[in-house]
Amino acid sequence: MTNKYDTLRAIRWDNDQLYLLDQRKLPHDYEEIELNTATDVAWAIKEMVVRGAPAIGITAAYGVVLAARRAYSENPNTWKVFIETELNALMHSRPTAVNLSWALRRMRSVFNHIEGDPEPLLLQEAHNIHQEDIDANYAMGAAGAALLPINCSVLTHCNTGSLATGGYGTALGVIRSGYADGRVVQVFADETRPWFQGARLTAWELMQDKIPVTLLPDSAAATLMRQKKVQWVIVGADRITANGDVANKIGTYSVAVLARQHGVKFMVVAPSSTVDIQLTHGDDIPIEERPAIEVLTAVGQQVAPDHATVWNPSFDVTPAELIDVIVTERGVVEQPNMEKMLSLMGGHAPAAVSA
Amino acid sequence: MTNKYDTLRAIRWDNDQLYLLDQRKLPHDYEEIELNTATDVAWAIKEMVVRGAPAIGITAAYGVVLAARRAYSENPNTWKVFIETELNALMHSRPTAVNLSWALRRMRSVFNHIEGDPEPLLLQEAHNIHQEDIDANYAMGAAGAALLPINCSVLTHCNTGSLATGGYGTALGVIRSGYADGRVVQVFADETRPWFQGARLTAWELMQDKIPVTLLPDSAAATLMRQKKVQWVIVGADRITANGDVANKIGTYSVAVLARQHGVKFMVVAPSSTVDIQLTHGDDIPIEERPAIEVLTAVGQQVAPDHATVWNPSFDVTPAELIDVIVTERGVVEQPNMEKMLSLMGGHAPAAVSA
């Protein structure tokens, strides 16, 4: 499946090597980093060379391939034991996006079927994960766009495009599909401090696609809504719990509260790999707090006084009751709640709830 | 009146010259700029060498002294005519803070009493405006602090301290007074994109006073409230209309909506020079939109792609119904409305309303 609004790839496997586009340097420098070990992949995830929940999952899957390559070359008979240290490093590279553990679990499920060199089968599974994510994005793009009125202006937060996923994007996939069929005519992008994903990545992706985008400070979103300049907020997710609560980039909850107050609709777009039905409530999600330096500085320049105290939670939790619709590749859930989410996932209620 | 929590002065008249602390360079460089003409003063206000509604008013008053000095030296008999060009430049240096036109009107009111060299009388009036602002800040500090419970944590937005006023501060004056008497124990400061007044100025002022301050991205304020980490929001104002609506730094309205949703109290602190009873509603206030470069960059470093479209409103309007109390040096107005504001100001309803 192809689309004219999608040319970027954040993650590339080529000639037996993994290449990540260094998103810390965008949009000013376009540089790929070649990664040869899973330890380096864990570093790249932690340092946000690659970011975005689906992209982190895919990257970790390729990381398992590299881990297996090394473990097998060093210990052909016991590689499944020796791979554990690097799998552990991947697992703990970032805590909030559940796609990471999902991808590792899926890669592990292949281990049992492997005899001899594990690389071909694991690489095939990593490619599957990558391609399925792209396919899911196109499916969600169509399903989400269908919910929008024509001539709609939308607000998005952070970056959920090709750079955050296998390709095309989750929330940005809906926006791309919506623009292609005339439903979305204008995108507003929160700049998304402290890492400026909106300014550096979302504006850049949309400008390449010639989709009209206007950048604003995060704190201006309330006035944007008060002036009735947007009808929908469309965001991604890093983890969705069984009750439909959503962890996403810090500021998402703020936008959700403001949207409800101003009669603006709120859509979350995420593949089912982002849904964690083991957790009952959003408050159970581990929220990463990143280093103070991200707030003390801006694009590498010091802003605040030396030694200023900082609170830098990287994500927040939006309760299900503020969400009008969750779009996944498995289907659309309006007014999400536990019953609907479990039905979508074909799962059972977490033990604490069913008890 | 003195207080141990106040050593800074943004505006200094010394040896017949005006000196402004260059707030664009804080906290990394502490540099004063000497200003010799009102045209330069208008430039300094426009470029935000000095900012903050009360400080802008005081600076403009000293600007009138410099304008009169030049006009009188060039045209001793007709200086009141020739001063108009520079008064006009001052008047239009920034549109939103009404303290600017208030100060100019007050300086003009002295013109009629002047014979001969205008400088001594005008300088006296500028000094009066400056000192009255400091006195008002101490009065508001005490009145506002008295409204707070003991062991209270507060959130503030932008900078409203010594740097934004004649000295001591409006919202930050309340925080200083509240800290001095044990009511405020912890301050959270929004970093306040795009100009980072919170990171660069508020954190810096409070750290000098050894008042505990934690800096956060603007978009994290909602989660701060959800986690019940603050009980009050305390902010300043650039203009307050007859009905109690408040224009203040972009993001204030967002914080006000969030505060109401989370049961957090919302206090506005501003001298009566900020009240514009000629305007009925906040929607009548001219809202400055500043250059895109402020959002395209951060502390001088490029963030966004070249030629990205930006929306950069510098202020927003918080409707009176979201405000629990307005503190002025004339008194405290709880649940502000037009009747109470007009009573406070001893004024009459604007024509459009009384008609």
Image (cartoon, coloured by chain):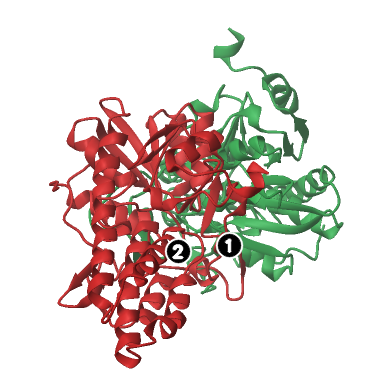
Chain colours: A green, B red
Residue A190 can be seen, yes or no: yes
Residue A348 vertical position relative to residue A276 in the rendered view, above or below: above
> What subunit carries mark 1?
A
In the rendering, at what x and y percent does residue B346 appear?
A: 44, 42
Number of numbered discs:
2
Three-letter amino acid code at the position of disc 2: Ser
Label 2 secondary element: helix
Residue at the location (69% across, 70% down)? A208
Q: Nearer the viewer, residue B65 or B200?
A: B65
Residue at the location (49% across, 26% down)? A284
User: Which quadrant holds the C terminus of chain B?
Assistant: top right
Residue at the location (26% across, 51% down)? A308
> What subunit carries mark 2?
B
Three-letter amino acid code at the position of disc 1: Leu
Residue beneath label 1, please? Answer: A201
State which mark lies toward you, 1 or 2: 2
A11 sits left or right of B270 in the view:
right
Residue beneath label 2, please? Answer: B101
Mark 1 and mark 2: Cα distance apart in space: 42 Å
In the rendering, at what x and y percent does residue B206 appear?
A: 24, 49
Report the residue that reaches farthest toward the top.
A355
Residue B192 vertical position relative to residue B354 in the rendered view, above or below: below
B338 sits left or right of B105 in the view:
right
